[in-house]
Image (spheres, grey):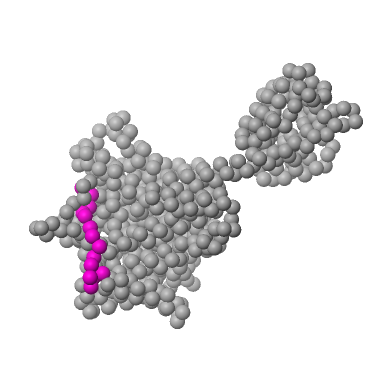
């Protein structure tokens, strides 16, 4: 801890104020996602604390904030329901599943799968950012709602039993809320123009809280927001003790095939969603700060945090793009802000619950609206007609699927579409220039990549029956990229030999030569390795350097 403070003492003020702002913004988010998952608000707050403290200290991206997230909460709610259907064991199912989630994520880091985030195309990244900005924006409208009451004044439960029916607030209460949100945003926009020495987001929250508390306004607060999500008769509070080790996590559980068949799919989905959101948020923070994080280290930290959540009664989570943007925009660049945010959140739970419960929801909504404005890639509108149509389609597709379904489906769909488009475009690029030597040998000069997508086009270039008795295929400007390409060459050679014609292969890459010779002794005489063309050595050196 002292080392962290020494490393960031020049930026200590930014780290401190940013951490305090993030801590305040974490409270309603953690509570809301706990309600979504169908668990107690304190479980969401504990989850945010444990995710935040572990990933801030050990994670691969300083400045990134982790906590309880909606993307994972929407999956958890079904898991909790299944657990409750087996004898009120919803929380046990959740905590045990988090142990497997953490294990899968740690394995992803150990096997260095985090590096594959580099393969995510830029349109997918822009779609991810835009989609999450829309999700954050629409989620704030839930703060403008209140429970629907029946004739006796009781809250009406939803059909699935998780939560209560709500409706938009009306009249003066609505306009007061809108006014406070606008005032929060106005402070955050105007204050930096006057001075950047005072943190705009934290100042806005404190000003709005002061106005509401000292004027006695009747508006929605953190405390009333929690109460609205609880059954009749229960009063919302974030007060609690330290997270406790879940000694009874395995009691009453029958560890049979049916149990693992239930939780393992959820564990895989949650691990995938958590890693995708965390690694893509890491990538976004890299771009914003012009620095580079360590994806594999982040995978291990995220997994470790989820295991700790499972053992100590938190709901788990992953990186939070909204709070991360707040942190970065507030000037934080190191690990200290995340540590301060997590520790401050715990202090709220232990000592300052009644005070934090008075913070108006409107102030936090205003901060999140500013996060949306800063997160959304507005340049996507400007470049939409300047980029390839397929890239524009992928951008819109990922944004739409993120809003309709979830992040994992959106990103996977975007990557698959981008990969198919890339393969198709490269498949069309393979060419064969043909000429006849003085001795009658027909030469095919191949250029373009030879892989599964271009094999059919490659094979169509050859007229085995019409070719002379001696044929030479020159791969100086081509790269055989996969097993499909190797197999195509193998089949082509067999066709020429079946027609009693001599075929010579030239300028194949060393790795391709090794594979072909290993596959059949025939290629020892077919492949010409005595190369005197200087271009071949230049191309080979470039290929080996790339590998």
Name which quarter of the figure residue 329 lies in. Answer: bottom left
At 38% from the left edge and 66% from the top edge, which residue is drawn?
Answer: 369
The stretch of residues the image draws in magenta is: 161-174
Residue that sits furthest to the bottom in the current view: 194
Residue 149 shown in magenta: no
**From the viewer's perspective, is residue 96 above or below residue 360?**
above
Where in the figure is residue 502, as x and y percent of width and height?
A: 80, 22
User: Is residue 465 left or right of 324 when viewed as pictured?
Assistant: right
At 29% from the left edge and 60% from the top edge, which residue is drawn?
Answer: 142
Q: Is residue 298 visible?
A: no
Name which quarter of the figure residue 2 lies in. Answer: bottom left
User: Is residue 531 left or right of 310 when viewed as pictured?
Assistant: right
Residue 162 shown in magenta: yes
Q: Is residue 398 visible?
A: yes
Tell me the quarter of the image containing the N terminus.
bottom left
Where in the figure is residue 57, as x and y percent of width and height?
A: 43, 57
């Amino acid at each position: 801890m002292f080392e962290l403070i020494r490393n960031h003492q020049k930026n200590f003020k930014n780290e401190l104020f940013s951490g305090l702002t993030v801590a305040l913004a974490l409270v309603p988010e953690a509570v809301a996602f706990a309600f979504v998952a169908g668990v107690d608000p304190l479980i969401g707050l504990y989850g945010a604390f444990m995710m935040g403290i572990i990933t801030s200290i050990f994670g691969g991206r300083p400045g990134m904030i982790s906590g309880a997230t909606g993307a994972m909460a929407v999956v958890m709610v079904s898991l909790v329901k299944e657990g409750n259907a087996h004898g009120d064991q919803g929380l046990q199912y959740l905590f045990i599943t988090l142990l497997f989630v953490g294990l899968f994520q740690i394995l992803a880091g150990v096997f260095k799968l985090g590096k594959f985030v580099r393969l995510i195309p830029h349109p997918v990244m822009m779609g991810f950012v835009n989609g999450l900005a829309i999700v954050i924006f629409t989620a704030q409208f839930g703060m403008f709602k209140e429970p629907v009451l029946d004739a006796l004044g009781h809250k009406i439960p939803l059909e699935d039993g998780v939560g209560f029916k709500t409706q938009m607030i009306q009249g003066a209460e609505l306009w007061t809320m809108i006014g406070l949100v606008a005032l929060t945003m106005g402070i955050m926009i105007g204050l930096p123009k006057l001075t950047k020495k005072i943190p705009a987001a934290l100042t806005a929250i404190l000003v709005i809280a002061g106005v509401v508390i000292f004027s006695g306004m009747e508006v929605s607060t953190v405390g009333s927001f929690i109460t609205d999500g609880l059954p009749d008769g229960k009063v919302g509070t974030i007060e609690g003790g330290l997270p406790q080790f879940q000694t009874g996590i395995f009691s009453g559980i029958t560890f049979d095939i049916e149990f693992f068949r239930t939780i393992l799919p959820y564990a895989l989905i949650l691990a995938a969603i958590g890693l995708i959101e965390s690694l893509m948020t890491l990538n976004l923070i890299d771009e914003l700060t012009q620095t580079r994080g360590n994806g594999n280290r982040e995978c291990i930290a995220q997994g470790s945090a989820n295991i700790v959540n499972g053992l100590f009664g938190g709901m788990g989570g992953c990186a939070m793009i909204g709070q991360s943007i707040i942190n970065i925009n507030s000037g934080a660049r190191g690990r200290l802000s995340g540590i301060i945010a997590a520790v401050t959140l715990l202090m709220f739970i232990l000592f300052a619950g009644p005070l934090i419960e008075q913070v108006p929801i409107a102030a936090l909504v205003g901060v999140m609206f500013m996060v949306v404005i800063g997160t959304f890639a507005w340049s996507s509108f400007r470049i939409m007609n300047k980029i390839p149509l397929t890239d524009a389609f992928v951008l819109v597709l990922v944004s739409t699927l993120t809003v309709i379904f979830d992040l994992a489906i959106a990103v996977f769909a975007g990557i698959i579409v981008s990969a198919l488009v890339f393969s198709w475009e490269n498949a069309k690029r393979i060419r064969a220039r043909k000429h006849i030597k003085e001795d009658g040998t027909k030469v095919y000069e191949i250029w373009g990549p030879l892989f599964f997508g271009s094999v059919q086009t490659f094979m169509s270039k050859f007229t085995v029956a019409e070719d002379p008795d001696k044929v030479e295929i020159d791969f100086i400007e081509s790269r055989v990229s996969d097993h499909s390409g190797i197999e195509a060459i193998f089949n082509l050679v067999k066709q020429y030999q079946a027609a009693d014609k001599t075929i010579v292969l030239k300028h194949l890459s060393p790795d391709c030569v090794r594979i072909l010779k290993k596959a059949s002794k025939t290629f020892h005489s077919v492949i010409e390795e005595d190369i005197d063309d200087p271009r071949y050595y230049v191309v080979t050196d470039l290929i080996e350097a790339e590998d």
